[in-house]
Image (tube, rainbow, N blue to C red):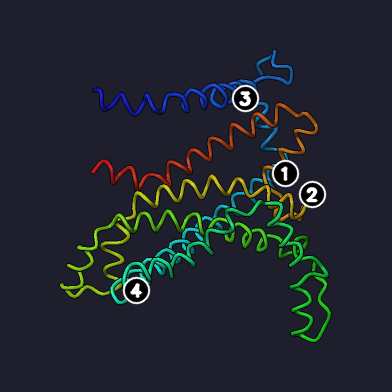
Amino acid sequence: MRRKIVPWLFLAPSLGGVILFTGLPFLDVVKRSFQDAMGTRFVGMDNYRAVLANSAFRLAAGNTVRFLAVCIPLLMTVSFTAALLISAGSNIGRESKGAADTGDRYSVFRTTLVLPMTIPAASMVLVWKILLCPDGVLNQFLSGASGRTWQVDWAFSRWAFPVLTATYLWKNTGYDMILWLAGLQGISGELYEAAKMDGAGVFARMWYITLPGLKGTFGLVGILSVVNSFRVYREAYLLAGSYPDASIYLIPHLFAHWFLDLDIQKMTAAAAMMTAIALILAVIMGMPGMKRRKR
């Protein structure tokens, strides 16, 4: 009993702060989503129906779902591949040249991929603007390579969604890679050695050892990737402003406009719906890890 209580005692200050400053206010938001703007009259599901009937909400929700559907698998695949390459290279180098030399060499790759996390969003977007504006580096390079003038405003064209996707991947790949590396280090090397002795190839070891051993990590990386995807609004806003191209008009853009109009009913109803969807996604992404712990 004492072992079970002690961790909760350490967590109590943080949990208390979350409940007081986040949990209780959100419960008030849920309550207001069923009331009128003054919070004095119960209106049932009217606010939710108004949100679902709003064309701007449908556009923003569709773009957000598309962004999640494209970016989350891409991010997890790219970061997992990077982690595998660095882990495999470190193991090969450790066997041939020693652990110290290998650690110094491959720490450069890890640092390079993690570096975007340390750059402020405003500074990062400024660099992207220099690259992607009509007179930017990318257009100048394409003009020199093709022999014709390029003046594409990449952030306000049909390329806006790929630009935002690339920004998100560049910013978050290193973070997820570190998590994958931590999971890979938790898999015993003896399992791989035994599999090699039994004649298992690279793909067999990947399928029967690596992937099952990373089920818990998969859930953690998935949940954090979903959470970080909702923070891409900073990049979208700094890159294209409050009224970006329609393909990257996201839920936070809509919330900002409703906040300026003090449209409390729609804001509270949409917030409750988006939170419910985010929780469902988090549970789905975390199911592999929960199943593994039960076993």
Q: Which residue is mark 2?
A: 243
- Which of label 4 and label 3 is nearer to you? 4
Q: Which mark is residue 29?
A: 3
Judge left or right: residue 127 versus residue 203: right
The Cα–Cα distance between marks 2 and 1, rounded to whole angstroms, is: 8 Å
Q: Earlier in the sequence, mark 1 or mark 3?
A: 3
Kind of element beneath mark 1: helix
**Residue 122 location in percent, x, y?**
71, 52
The Cα–Cα distance between marks 4 and 2, rounded to whole angstroms, is: 50 Å
Q: Earlier in the sequence, mark 4 or mark 2?
A: 4
Q: Which mark is residue 253?
A: 1
Q: Earlier in the sequence, mark 4 or mark 3?
A: 3
- The quadrant in which the C terminus is found is top left
Q: For residue 264, which quarter of the picture?
A: top right
**Residue 292 location in percent, x, y?**
28, 46
Dot 4 amino acid type: Gly
- Which of label 4 and label 2 is nearer to you? 4
Dot 3 amino acid type: Val
Q: Which residue is mark 4?
A: 93
The Cα–Cα distance between marks 1 and 4, rounded to whole angstroms, is: 48 Å
Depth order, front residue of 42/29: 29
